[in-house]
Image: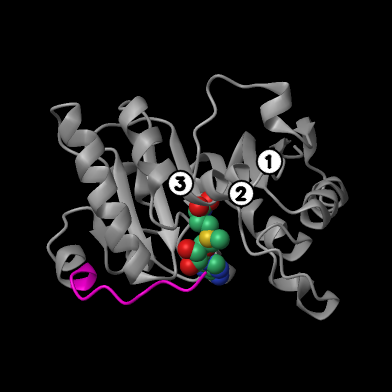
Amino acid sequence: MRMRKKAWARPELAECPYFIEEPQALKGKWQEWFPRRGPFHVELGCGKGVFTAEIVRRNPAINYLGIDLSMDVLGSARRNIEQACGEEGRMADNIALTAFDIERVTEILEEKDQVERLYINFCNPWPKGKHHKKRLTHTRQLEKYQTFLQDGGEIWFKTDNTDLYLATQRYLTETGFEILSQTNDLYAQGDPENIVTEHELMFAGQGIPIKRIIARWNRRK
Ligand SMILES: C[S@@+](CC[C@H](N)C(=O)[O-])C[C@H]1O[C@@H](n2cnc3c(N)ncnc32)[C@H](O)[C@@H]1O
């Protein structure tokens, strides 16, 4: 789905105290950037931030970083976050947003950043074999995430796409992640804590089962 250009997105992000223009400068320092120390969770491909805003609202003691390539969707994410935190009567002080290519994520995150959880929601399935390496859950990417996930850190992955779901189980196992839970129909299984993303809303509305995998990275000593 192509996003229409939003003339207001860049100016609003330029004024936003939690939009990070140079995330490379914070590599290894994310824990100090937030006003309060806390668990650090990162969302890859946060899009318009419907999920981001809700998780930030629900968990003020957890610090979040939302990453996306597109300034236009990040502009919408900022507005959604402002609204959610405004409704709680507080500042959005447990979130950072940045525009960055996740294929180069090791330029902005490292082990010292102690990432406790990674969310990957409805990433592009890249269906053609020659493009599989671009999948955000491909082994090539998972090996990058292992450099900054803390011991026992988790990946929470959701998709509508059966091929990507099955391949991701394989990618996770091949790279030594421990699969803690998996379902090919999250709504049939039920999870009252599930936070719906904008793409999830669309796919679930079309009757497409939502798949989810939760996996843990145990660092070898
Ligand atoms: C299909 S949307 C999903 C958005 C949201 N997570 C959801 O579930 O509704 C995928 C998002 O990932 C972003 N994205 C895709 N590849 C990326 C990359 N290599 N680096 C950063 N963002 C990327 C896109 O810009 C888009 O906003």
Front residue of this view, candidates 113 and 81: 81
Disc 1 packing (10 Å; few <14; some 14–19; many ≥20): many
Label 1 CB-ligand 1 distance < 8 A: no
Disc 2 element: helix
Front residue of this view, candidates 77 and 176: 77
**Residue designated by label 3:** 113
Residue type of the residue flagged with mark 1: Ile
- Magenta region: which residues? 1-10
> Magenta span has 134?
no
- Check the image and tell me how it is coloured: one colour
Residue type of the residue flagged with mark 2: Phe
Quadrant assignment, res 178: top right
Disc 3 element: helix
| Residue 88 spot, x, y in % from top left | 19, 26
Disc 3 packing (10 Å; few <14; some 14–19; many ≥20): many
Quadrant assignment, res 140: bottom right
Question: Do the CB atoms of the residues marked 2 and 3 lie less than 8 Å apart?
Answer: no
Q: Quadrant of the C terminus?
A: top right
Label 2 CB-ligand 1 distance < 8 A: no
